[in-house]
Image (cartoon, helix red, strand yellow):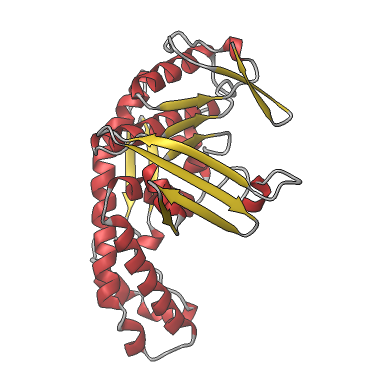
Amino acid sequence: MRSFRTNDADRQIREGRAAYRLVGRVARREGRVIPIGIERRPGRYTIHVAGEPVQRLSDLAGNFPVHIMTGDTATVLDGGPRYRRQTLDWALFHVEHGYRRAWQRYARCLRQRNAALRVNAPASQVTAWDPELVDAGNAIDRMRRAYLAAFEPLIAKEVGLLLPDKTLSLRFQSGWLREVTLQEALVRSLGTDRSRGYTHAGPHRADYSLWMNGKPVASHFSRGQQKAVIAAFMMGQVKLQQQRDRTGGAFLLDDLASELDAGHQARILASLAELGTQVFVTAIDASALDLSAWPELKRFHVEHGEIQELV
């Protein structure tokens, strides 16, 4: 389990304590309930899923995806391509069984090919990795395109609810020129790859962008409108997971009121209520939120690291 505040997992352990432990139950859509548990001690995790130990955090995340919307989430719009690829890969990891294996194959070949390029190995040693790189790379590209084709109408519908006068579309770049195959792109770029020491063409260079009314969201719309688009983006992800019979996990929304007027806040909360998934919303002034879409809810007050339920 990683914090969205820091990459240092040991900082999640309360000062003066040896470890932390978190346990819970995940209700799957088919009705099955899976117990999960995670313990963090300095430098290592101990994880159990359905009573069995697992070695990778990804095995835990696969059973319970967490969608987090914070003030930093807008990097899907104005951050670099790497962040957007990570967002896309995370989504595919939860809905496409073969994606992790294809990405692991591709990453392994890419490391080997780049290692050969860095030591200026003969061209034959570099291109020896191309057949498997192309096979895995094309599989990744197909799954990404299929995901975005299914995802685009879902996010467009959410945007239409939050911003009724706006129409959203997605634009995807594979990581090589559209008019050539990946194999042809690798052949064309071999000279440049050898001079610079790394592979230029491939799905590791892919990117996508969000457009609204024919203009890029990142540069032509207000921060409030961008936040509404990000909320629609994440709700679309949850809906697609649910369509693929995956658990919706949890939706964490930090400081909803920031940069959003009352009308947009109410629309987002109403849309979240329709997801049928677990939602956590933080706010400095909870009384300012329109929670009429939530007939049953629990309120908590957090102060100095202590959580107290309000009744």
Q: In this view, does 120 lie to the left or right of 29?
A: right
Left or right, 297 with reference to 21: left
Outermost residue to the right: 16
Residue placed farthest to the bottom in the image? 122
Q: Is residue 306 above or below residue 180?
A: above
Q: Residue shown at 69%/50% (left/top)? A: 18
| Residue beneath the point at 47% across and 42% down | 76
Q: Which of 226 and 61 is in front in this view?
A: 61
Whether residue 183 is visible to the viewer of this picture, yes or no, is yes
Give the side of residue 184 with respect to residue 272, left or right.
Answer: left
Vertical placement of residue 87 versus 238, above or below: below
Depth check: 74 or 215 in front?
74
Task: Please tell me which residue lies in front, 5 or 174.
Answer: 5
Q: Where is residue 72 in the image (x, y as percent from the top left)?
A: 57, 39
Asked if residue 155 is positioned above or below residue 43 in the image, the reply reads above
Q: In this view, does 137 lie above or below 264?
A: below
Identity of the residue drawn at 62% across and 54% down: 41
- The spot of residue 213 in percent (x, y) is 36, 29
The answer to which image quadrant residue 184 occupies is bottom left
